[in-house]
Image (cartoon, rainbow, N blue to C red):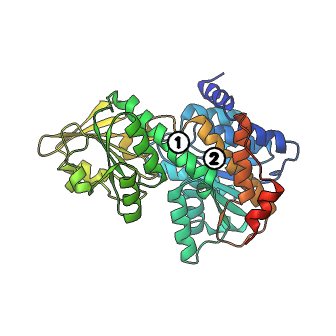
Amino acid sequence: MNLGQKKIDWVGRFMPLLNSVENEYVTKKPLNGMKVGMSIHLEAKTAYLALLLKKLGAEVFITGSNPLSTQDDVAEALKEHGLNVFAKRTSDETLYMRGIYSVLEAKPNLILDDGADLTVTAHVEMPQVLVNLRGATEETTTGLRRLRALQNQGKLKVPVIAVNDAFTKHLFDNRYGTGQSTWDSIMRNTNLTIAGKVVVVAGYGWCGKGVAIRARGLGARVIITEVDPIKALEAIMEGFEVMQMKEAAKVGDFFVTVTGNTSVISVEEFLQMKDGAVLANAGHFNVEIDVKALEHLCIEKFEARPNVVGYVMPNGRTLFLIGEGRLVNLAAADGHPVEIMDLSFALQAMSLIYLSTKTLEPRVYSVPTQIDEKVAQMKLNAMNVKIDELSVEQKKYLESF
């Protein structure tokens, strides 16, 4: 048994929700005859999801959703299970996009997307794929931003289920998953203490909340930077400091970007940072830290540790960048905890089943409430937790005026 298969077997022990979905639907084969195209961080947890979709009847075509997030041993293990795999860990954007094109050339009936590269590429470069496409699901905040932009311009041609917006996704995956996995990566790659340090978190959405909460739990002094006054006020009420990035740059020891936007940290900030400052990105794309500007600005560049590159600034100070500024928890670690992704992937599987049975107009849809609540109940059942139910009298009271 290869290492990739061992990784898959390990996560399968801790994904009771996906196992419940399998038990409920495996004999019904709701995806029978369907081609499912997947663009997702290809590691053990996503592999277990892909294998479930195959068991539910789908022919699966899978590639990565970020150049450095594919684990090659897991990809090889999936090939042995008969899946169509077009993914390889690489820094080569051209090779990465070749995987996207290969999945789309199979003309999938359903797409499971993480960051929207499959769905957007189909719309912009390969419209012939849309003929057979019944719909797509999207895992991320960044991906939904792109797909809603398509919709707002009247260019979205298929229905999309916004998995990221489900309560059992963003309240848990974005917050607790990103929070734990980001610091797991930073700590294992730097071997540095977080306690007593100044951590600057750019962005206070659900992912930023998770990163900030975990940093505080590790003993750091946490500063939030924001462009949204409501989120900034929320951060203050949660006990965090809030300031502009140009000021935070002077005092931070660790910087984590979680905004979904571009050039959040660039030349002005690089030149203000302390010697030894550590930079990491926890947003989907490698644009939040302006790596091109960092490369141009530095007078020397060297590998400090595996996954960590040092950049010597003109002022003599050295900054350290983890994972090339790509998604730090996957480019340089194992991604979110298994049990957290079990929630998200149960939503994904059930949303694909839902799409396979419906004919919907082309727009972005919320996950149906009954699916969201079912996944939450499945998780409670797996934890042996029971909750109260409303009595008939209580239901009548809530419906009265």
| Tag 1 residue | 177
Residue appearing at x 37%, y 34% in the figure: 307
Three-letter amino acid code of the residue under disc 2: Ser
Tell me: residue 37, above or below residue 144: above
| Tag 2 residue | 344
Residue appearing at x 38%, y 39% in the figure: 216
Crowding around mark 1 (Cα neighbors within 10 Å: few <14, some 14 to 19, many 20+) is many
Place of residue 268 in the rendered image (x, y in percent of width and height, measured from the top left)? 20, 56
Three-letter amino acid code of the residue under disc 1: Gly
Kindly give the residue lying farthest to the left in the view shown.
Answer: 315
Regarding mark 2 in the picture, which secondary structure is present there?
helix
The answer to whether mark 1 and mark 2 are in CB contact below 8 A is yes
Answer with left or right where residue 213 lies relative to residue 35.
left
Place of residue 2 in the rendered image (x, y in percent of width and height, measured from the top left)? 62, 23
Residue appearing at x 46%, y 45% in the figure: 210
Which badge, 1 or 2, comes first in the chain's sequence? 1
Place of residue 362 in the rendered image (x, y in percent of width and height, measured from the top left)? 67, 72
Quarter occupied by the N terminus: top right
182 or 98, which lies in front?
Answer: 182
Residue appearing at x 43%, y 57% in the figure: 260
Residue 82 visible within the image: no
Number of numbered labels in the structure image:
2
219 or 338, which lies in front?
Answer: 219
